[in-house]
Image (spheres, rainbow, N blue to C red):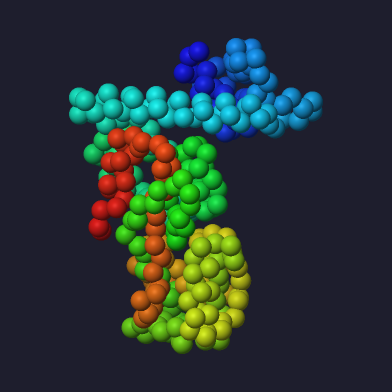
């Protein structure tokens, strides 16, 4: 069986589409179907459920096992290629990375540019998602690295810490606290805050800190992404508590006032996740080195 056939199968499951799997592998949809049937014939097991009228790709129990092990074979093959390149001092291949929006949009671009300048034969395949999906994609092998805020220990995952973010108070330039040298937690009492949704790690940390200090605030609005929160603060919905890298542009242009928070608890740790049972590619190790370097 060719390694390309395993890749076609895994791409079909990941993309949930025969047409997209065909496009990714530069073959026809008919060829995808033929390769799936060939795999099932070889192992005498049905790997995919066929449901008339539905386009979803659903794995059978045997398919789940085959998908998991095929991922391991593909990862081992990629690692072999990387190690062979390393013998001649060449770093190549593609590192698949999933990250949350607030880190990916504001902190990844300069890191990716640095990586590409140092290792032009390698590539970073970066996608943005919510924390739960980033973790799930690392666990199932869809991506090699995941980058999240407030990483939580999970069985089977290794966490490497990046330099943490400072959380800062963000408000319109005419806000009563905009000219302060720093804002203390007690100054937030009774303010209208635009918050992340309740299930996001930064929101949970914010709620935890405020509760520990006995501070009540007014929930002006809740959003699931940092860009909407910033725009809401700009138009006067309220103020917010956000990671500093995400508001550097607004601070520089004067669209928002950004004030340090006094207490030491206002820090957002950032972690790089990878599966403990997999050896990282050389390119991934180099990228982690860039991500963890002090600014």
Side of 121 where 148 appears, left or right: right
Name which residue lies at 48% across and 14% down.
2
Side of 271 where 239 appears, left or right: right
Report the label total.
0
Depth check: 123 or 288 in front? 288
Q: Reply above or below: 287 against 169.
A: above
Q: Reply above or below: 150 against 127.
A: below
Residue 54 visible from this viewpoint: yes
Residue 176 visible from this viewpoint: no
Please state the horizontal and vertical placement of residue 227, each as a whole percent of the image.
51, 60
Say which quadrant the C terminus sits in.
Answer: bottom left
Q: Residue lying at the far right in this picture: please name it.
A: 52
Depth check: 73 or 195 in front? 73
Please state the horizontal and vertical placement of residue 78, each as a whole percent of the image.
38, 27
Name which residue lies at 55% across and 70% down.
195
Name which residue lies at 37% across and 80% down.
263
Please state the horizontal and vertical placement of residue 163, each as a whole percent of the image.
32, 59
Name which residue lies at 39% across and 55% down.
271
Side of 28 where 139 appears, left or right: left
Q: Reply above or below: 66 against 44.
A: below
Please state the horizontal and vertical placement of residue 126, each as a whole percent of the image.
43, 42
Q: Quadrant of residue 66?
A: top right
């Amino acid at each position: 069986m060719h390694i390309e056939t395993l890749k076609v199968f895994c791409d079909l499951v990941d993309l949930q589409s025969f047409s997209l799997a065909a496009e990714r592998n530069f073959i026809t949809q008919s060829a995808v179907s033929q390769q799936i049937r060939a795999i099932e014939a070889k192992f005498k097991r049905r790997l995919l459920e066929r449901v008339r009228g539905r386009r979803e790709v659903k794995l059978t129990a045997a398919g789940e096992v085959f998908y998991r092990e095929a991922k391991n074979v593909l990862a081992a093959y990629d690692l072999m290629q990387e190690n062979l390149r390393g013998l001649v001092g060449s770093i190549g291949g593609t590192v698949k990375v999933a990250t949350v929006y607030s880190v990916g949009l504001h902190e990844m671009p300069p890191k990716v540019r640095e990586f590409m300048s140092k290792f032009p034969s390698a590539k970073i395949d970066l996608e943005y998602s919510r924390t739960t999906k980033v973790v799930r994609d690392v666990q199932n092998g869809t991506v090699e690295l995941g980058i999240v805020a407030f990483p939580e220990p999970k069985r089977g995952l290794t966490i490497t810490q990046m330099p943490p973010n400072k959380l800062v108070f963000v408000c319109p330039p005419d806000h009563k606290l905009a000219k302060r040298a720093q804002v203390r937690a007690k100054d937030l009492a009774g303010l209208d805050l635009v918050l992340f949704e309740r299930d996001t790690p930064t929101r949970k940390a914010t709620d935890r800190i405020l509760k520990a200090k006995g501070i009540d605030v007014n929930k002006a609005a809740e959003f699931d992404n940092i860009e909407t929160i910033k725009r809401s603060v700009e138009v006067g919905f309220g103020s917010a508590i956000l990671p500093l890298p995400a508001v550097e542009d607004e601070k520089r242009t004067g669209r928002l006032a950004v004030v340090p928070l006094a207490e030491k608890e206002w820090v957002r740790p950032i972690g790089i996740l990878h599966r403990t049972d997999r050896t990282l590619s050389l390119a991934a190790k180099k990228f982690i080195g860039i991500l963890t370097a002090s600014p």
